[in-house]
């Protein structure tokens, strides 16, 4: 019997390339005759291009072509963002691009272009835009409507009633309710109420979104950084205005995405279209400075929460209002936030209201737990406040409210597939030694005060209905074709294990095929929403079962007897009880090719996606081919929970916070890859801490221009900012509604880390919640020293 | 030697300030327009007037003599990536903030984005591609394999080079010392725990091979 690979540590098959310099990321592909492009970025937060004079640039030797917004296929919907725009909606928005023989010439040509811009009104703070007479970020409105943006203004009375320190709450654009919050507040034993601000944060993956494109025989070859290889083809085809069949997407490695490169990125349109225009390959290198503008960001919130509790800690009412900073093109974080809150607390009654408001700030996109991380970090410190008033232990209050397997999600109150949340809380509590550690609250040594806190963070972690595609080739190896991208989570290898375990095959006999759509990749999920581990262990499990069936059938035809007489293990199909009577995988592949038909891609299952059908047809005759759709049911929402515990020391003389210890525990179903799971959890926790602590946006309010454009002004956590040995444990109970039992992990750690940090800092301050991110040392110090706050409670970008 | 002093001495050979002065002297500025890559025909007269013509230099890269034409303002990272085909050295920020471009000069770590190519003549340049010895992985590379290190790994070549430089100075660092010595590199995936496990394993492997 081959060793089962699920649940063991493997060395990912791409690691050797990554540490010898052989792994090629987008900017590492160079083509013969390659030209370089540079972007002309808007110097204003909102403007209209009146005219452009390119004559000086065009006269320069070495300039090969200029690309304007009008030459790109028009975005399909009203607010859809194009790669270039003649109405830039934020400072740094690309207006046009120049291609030249080298980058210096392209940059010099950009400098030589004269753009006449008409400045337009701009807005940075959503609340400013909601006031009567306040500016709209877009000429077509400030909030999304049914047919594109529309204008929403609240009467002055809404702002007057709220005063400067409470969120004004006018007419929302979205709302839902469960039960009756007002009646529940009347009955509640303790009610807490806070105005809370969560910042916007740039993703800043290490690899900027550089890309290179060229055309050959009418086909576009695009080398780009993307989280999802196969699913990037469609968007790239739309950007270039061509059929999806004419796009070859190559993305073998992705140097981080975190939600900012889900299915490609808008800027890919520039090299794609420019290379066709000038008839040469075009490389567009994106700088870190440009990444700050076009690299996507998490949506910020200005929020208000009122929460009622019974004396035992049970949350009886949650009333939530979120005003979202949507950037120039929108985001849906705020709505997700309301749903995620139910997965934390199962409130007996709840009301959710929200307004997403456009601003002239860089575009938003999903960022690891979009909406989820924000709401967890915003509400967990408020729950702590209630726990203190109630005299209930802070771990206990989470356990009282956490969902069990009969739990429910969101406004429709649908079920979960599994929820070992209390088990995860207990596990994390034991790992961290919560009972003893929580006694350290407020301990003072010299100028340092200890704080202890925790955060529980749920997020969606799966989907279904994708395809798996396996080929046993005459080399005797199992080739697992993966349409998913290689973004660093090791899922290209880890989800392939589902197939090798079904076939009882040694991991050394598995070849993972990925990263290039010309290699015949199946229809896959986008690598977002922590779906991949769940969706593709299922798809590969389904394909593995189909492969077992084909091997048995083939063996019966070749060797006699019936299919059920045969077993599959160790790279052979053989008669039960007689290993010698059978075929090796290499022999099976040869027989399959000779027989053709359903054994070698000649007949294709009807229920496969067209993309997979095309991939199977392309592979026909190359081996024994099994392709299958994941038809396993999914009777509920797939969710993962992470609980993170933090101990900090706050220096009351400097306001600096040091994280002394971190421990996290999760319910993410069956553990596939222990070491990688711990690493992803810890990394997510650190990203959350970065949001709570050090990263930030600051704008010049007069000109609408960001100051914090680089790592040194908005620094993500470095190796000295986090504990040397964070600890981790997993409940490791299989989700009963998926064959491998695994759920995703990518997103929930972010909110857990952010909340644990915020709660621990509040604990060190005697339970005082400043209720905002980031929590910088100057803010903490002003509070400790009783000085007036250097910011308004509703101010953003401070 | 204290960790801070080690960093001081190792990083002290070339400062950001010196680099900027060097660029200005060479006649091109580190422009807000972003990276600049090679000079073209059109800029050549302008730049040559300021003394920034391409010149043929011989570099010692990974033990080989490589002759390249470089303009005076070209950085080592750009020469390695675009003239010598050594794309293992990554550019994450191009401004000495992230360390993805870390290479060794005479065994000491430097940011390739902040060194002018013409200044490294006569020095031994080592990149990630030069670590293997006759197909055998360097102990640091082997340690990454053993520990399953890194996630997206865009930072990996820089971290690996920093670890090689670190072990040369301190063959048996503690976890705390390793963190200090590797703090010039940024990992946005936050894989620091595995990175430190790798550093510890690399030290162990180096000692056993020595």
Image: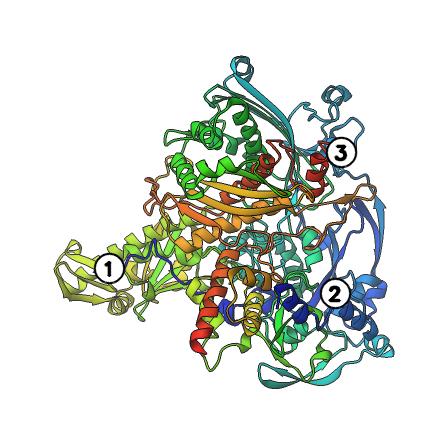
Q: Could you say where residue A118 lies in the image, as x and y percent from the top left? A: 85, 46
Q: Could you say where residue A214 lies in the image, as x and y percent from the top left? A: 61, 66
On residue A65, the disc is: 2
Q: Chain of mark 2?
A: A
Left or right relative to A557: residue B139: right
The CA distance from mark 1 to mark 2 is: 56 Å
Foreground residue, A603 or B81? B81
Mark count: 3
Question: Which quadrant is the N terminus of chain B positioned in?
Answer: bottom right
- The residue under label 3 is A787
Reply above or below: A461 against B164.
Answer: above
Q: Disc 1 vs disc 2: which is toward the camera?
A: 1
Foreground residue, A477 or A195? A195
Left or right relative to A79: residue A646: left
The CA distance from mark 3 to mark 1 is: 75 Å
On residue A551, the disc is: 1
Q: Chain of mark 1?
A: A
Outermost residue to the front: A446
Q: Residues within 10 Å of mark 3 (few under 14, many from 20)?
A: few
Foreground residue, A553 or A162? A162
Q: What secondary structure is marked by label 3?
A: loop
Labels 3 and 2 in the same subunit = yes
Q: Is residue A604 visible?
A: no
Q: Earlier in the sequence, mark 1 or mark 2?
A: 2
The CA distance from mark 3 to mark 2 is: 58 Å
Q: Residues within 10 Å of mark 1 (few under 14, many from 20)?
A: many
Q: Residue at x 80, y 41 (%)?
A: A701
Q: Chain of mark 3?
A: A
């Amino acid at each position: 019997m081959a060793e089962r690979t699920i649940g063991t540590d493997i060395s990912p098959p791409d690691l050797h390339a990554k540490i010898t310099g052989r792994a090629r990321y987008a900017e590492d592909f160079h083509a013969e005759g390659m030209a370089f492009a540079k972007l002309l970025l808007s110097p204003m937060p909102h403007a209209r291009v009146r005219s452009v004079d390119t004559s000086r640039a065009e006269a320069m030797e070495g300039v090969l072509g200029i690309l304007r917004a009008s030459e790109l296929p028009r975005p399909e919907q009203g607010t859809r963002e194009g790669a270039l725009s003649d109405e830039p909606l934020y400072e740094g928005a690309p207006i046009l691009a120049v291609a030249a023989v080298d980058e210096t010439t392209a940059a010099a040509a950009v400098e030589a272009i004269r753009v006449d811009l008409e400045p337009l009104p701009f807005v940075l703070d959503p609340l400013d835009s909601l006031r009567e007479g306040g500016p709209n970020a877009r000429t077509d409105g400030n909030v999304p409507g049914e047919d594109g943006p529309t204008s929403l203004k609240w009467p002055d009375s809404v702002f007057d009633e709220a005063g400067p320190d409470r969120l004004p709450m006018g007419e929302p654009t979205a709302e839902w309710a469960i039960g009756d919050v007002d009646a529940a507040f009347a009955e509640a034993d303790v009610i807490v109420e806070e105005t809370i601000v969560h910042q916007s944060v740039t993703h800043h993956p290490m690899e900027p979104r550089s890309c290179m494109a060229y055309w050959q025989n009418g086909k576009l070859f695009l080398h780009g950084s993307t989280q999802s290889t196969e699913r990037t083809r469609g968007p790239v085809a739309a950007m270039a205005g061509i059929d999806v069949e004419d796009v070859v997407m190559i993305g073998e490695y992705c140097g981080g995405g975190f939600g900012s490169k889900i299915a490609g990125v808008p800027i890919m349109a520039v090299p794609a279209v420019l290379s066709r225009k000038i008839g040469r390959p075009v490389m567009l290198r994106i700088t870190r400075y440009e990444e700050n503008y076009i690299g996507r960001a998490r949506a910020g919130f200005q929020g208000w929460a009122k929460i009622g509790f019974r004396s035992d800690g049970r949350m009886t009412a949650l009333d939530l209002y979120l005003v979202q900073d949507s950037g120039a093109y929108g985001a849906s974080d705020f709505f997700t936030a309301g749903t995620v809150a139910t997965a934390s607390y199962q409130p007996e009654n709840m009301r959710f209201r929200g307004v997403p408001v456009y601003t002239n700030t860089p575009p938003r996109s999903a960022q690891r737990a979009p909406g989820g991380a924000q709401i967890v970090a915003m509400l967990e410190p408020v729950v702590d406040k209630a726990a203190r008033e109630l005299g209930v232990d802070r771990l206990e209050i989470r356990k009282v409210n956490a969902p069990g397997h009969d739990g429910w999600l969101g406004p429709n109150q649908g079920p979960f597939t599994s929820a070992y949340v209390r088990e995860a809380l207990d596990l994390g509590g034991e790992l961290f030694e919560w009972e003893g550690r929580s006694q350290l609250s407020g301990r003072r040594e010299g100028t340092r005060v200890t704080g202890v806190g925790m955060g529980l963070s749920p997020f969606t972690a799966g989907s279904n209905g994708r395809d798996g595609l396996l080929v046993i080739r005459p080399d005797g190896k199992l080739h697992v074709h993966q349409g998913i991208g290689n973004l660093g989570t090791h899922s290209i290898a880890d989800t392939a294990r589902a197939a090798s375990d079904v076939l009882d095959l040694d991991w050394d006999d598995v070849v993972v095929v990925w990263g290039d759509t010309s290699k015949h990749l199946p229809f896959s999920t986008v690598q977002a929403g922590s779906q991949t581990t769940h969706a593709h262990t299922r798809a590969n499990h389904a394909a593995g079962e189909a492969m077992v069936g084909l091997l048995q059938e083939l063996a019966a035809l070749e060797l006699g007897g019936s299919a059920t007489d045969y077993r599959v293990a160790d790279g052979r199909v053989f008669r039960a009880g007689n290993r010698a009577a059978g075929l090796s995988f290499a022999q099976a592949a040869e027989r399959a090719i000779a027989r053709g038909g359903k054994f070698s891609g000649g007949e294709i299952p009807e229920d496969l996606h067209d993309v997979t059908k095309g991939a199977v047809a392309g592979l026909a005759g190359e081996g024994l081919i099994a392709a299958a759709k994941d038809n396993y049911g999914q009777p509920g929402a797939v969710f993962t929970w992470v609980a993170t515990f933090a101990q900090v020391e706050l220096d009351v003389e400097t306001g600096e916070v040091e994280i002394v210890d971190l421990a996290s525990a999760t319910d993410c179903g069956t553990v596939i890859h222990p070491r990688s799971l711990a690493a992803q959890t810890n990394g997510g926790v650190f990203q959350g801490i970065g949001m709570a602590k050090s990263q930030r946006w600051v704008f010049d309010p007069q000109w609408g221009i960001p100051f914090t454009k680089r790592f040194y002004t908005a620094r993500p956590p470095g190796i000295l900012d986090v504990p040397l040995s964070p600890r981790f444990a997993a409940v490791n109970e299989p989700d009963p509604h998926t064959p491998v039992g695994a759920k995703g992990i990518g997103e929930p750690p972010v909110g857990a880390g952010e909340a644990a940090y915020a709660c621990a800092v509040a604990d060190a301050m005697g339970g005082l919640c400043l209720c905002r991110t980031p929590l910088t040392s100057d803010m903490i110090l002003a509070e400790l020293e009783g000085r007036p706050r250097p910011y308004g409670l509703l101010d953003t970008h401070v | 030697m204290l960790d801070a002093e080690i960093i001081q001495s190792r990083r002290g050979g070339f400062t950001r300030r010196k680099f900027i002065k060097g660029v200005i002297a060479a006649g091109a500025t580190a422009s807000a327009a972003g990276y600049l890559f090679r000079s073209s025909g059109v800029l050549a007269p302008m730049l040559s007037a300021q003394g920034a013509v391409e010149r043929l230099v011989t570099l010692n890269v990974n033990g080989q003599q490589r002759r390249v034409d470089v303009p005076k303002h070209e950085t080592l990272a750009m020469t390695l990536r675009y003239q010598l085909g050594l794309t293992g050295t990554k550019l994450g920020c191009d401004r000495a903030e992230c360390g993805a471009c870390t290479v060794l000069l005479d065994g000491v770590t430097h940011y390739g984005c902040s060194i002018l190519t013409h200044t490294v003549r006569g020095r031994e340049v080592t990149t990630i591609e030069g670590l293997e010895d006759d197909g055998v992985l360097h102990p640091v590379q082997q340690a990454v394999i053993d520990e399953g290190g890194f996630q997206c790994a865009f930072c990996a070549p820089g971290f690996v080079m920093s670890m090689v430089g670190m072990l040369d100075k301190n063959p048996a660092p503690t976890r705390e010392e390793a963190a200090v010595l590797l703090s010039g590199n940024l990992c946005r995936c936050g894989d620091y725990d595995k990175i430190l496990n790798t550093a510890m394993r690399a030290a162990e492997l180096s000692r056993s091979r020595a």
